Amino acid sequence: MTEPAESSVSACFRSCSLRGSWSEQLSGLVTRTRSLGGVGRLRRNLYRILRAFPLWVWIGLSVLLGSILGIGLYTVSYAQGLSYLSNDPSACVNCHIMRDVYEGWNHSSHKSVATCNDCHIPQVLASKYIAKGLNGWHHSVAFTTGNFEEPIRITKRNKGILQQNCLRCHGTLVDPLLQHGGSESLDCVRCHARVGHGW
């Protein structure tokens, strides 16, 4: 009696038995499965990769990745991270260090016409969320580690954004000053430091 013909799948797995380094196994697997097509090839490659390591490695990796994801989601939830995507000034008070700044804005002349984002964040959509992301990262690292000065100071990059937003709203009013300012560039908050957060 003749033996049944071996399927291409079992032939592939038999020829891809564990031997040699990981890169040799992977390159051999890729070479051997090029002739197999479509979804079947993907399924066979996935099966091969899953069989490459013992079950306890996959369980440990799953626990590690699940822990990282869980801690990350908890942190975003606890810190009210999604509120930072809004335009609500009260989101800035999620960090206690910002309470005095928020109260200053609450008593300022700009409260009725401008929110935190109107002055401190670029108005172009892509730049807006890049700035929010960078500021969020720097603030979370600084406030978590306690590595910041009190009272907090605006960075050079954020001061440039603030200046652009001052000119966006008040450009026609200060245009004559800008034209006669000479080589020295004008800095709005040098004279008007208390406008946004004044008491």
Image: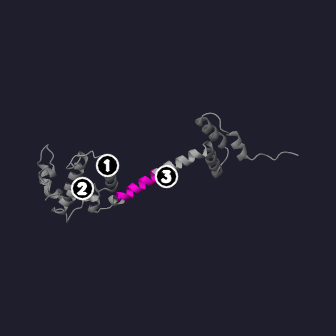
Residue 144 pos. (x, y %):
31, 49
Q: Amino acid at mark 3?
A: Gly
Relative side of 80 to 22, left or right = left
Relative side of 61 to 79, left or right = right
Q: Amino acid at mark 1?
A: Thr
How would you rate the neighbour count of disc 3 (Cα within 10 Å): few for under 14, some for 14-19, many for 20 or more?
few
Query: Is residue 186 or residue 120 the one in the foreground?
Result: 120
Query: Is residue 43 or residue 169 the one in the foreground?
Result: 43
Q: Is residue 34 visible?
A: no
Residue 127 pos. (x, y %):
32, 52
How would you rate the neighbour count of disc 2 (Cα within 10 Å): few for under 14, some for 14-19, many for 20 or more?
some
Seen at 65% across and 43% down, the residue is 33
User: From the viewer's perspective, is the residue at label 1 or at label 2 nearer?
Assistant: 1
Element type at mark 2: helix
Seen at 20% across and 57% down, the residue is 100
Residue occupied by mark 3: 66
Q: What whole-number distance in Å separates the C-alpha atoms at marks 3 and 2?
A: 33 Å
Residue 143 pos. (x, y %):
29, 49
Residue occupied by mark 2: 98
Residue occupied by mark 1: 144
Query: Is residue 59 or residue 141 the one in the foreground?
Result: 59
Residue 70 magenta-highlighted: yes
Q: What whole-number distance in Å separates the C-alpha atoms at marks 1 and 2?
A: 14 Å
Examine the residues drawn in magenta and state their main secondary structure.
Answer: helix
Q: Quadrant of residue 73?
A: bottom left
Q: How many numbered callouts? A: 3
Q: Earlier in the sequence, mark 3 or mark 2?
A: 3
Please report contact status of discs 3 and 2: CB closer than 8 Å, yes or no: no
Q: Which residues are magenta?
A: 68-81
Q: Quadrant of residue 182?
A: top left
Residue 40 pos. (x, y %):
65, 51
Relative side of 108 to 87, left or right = left
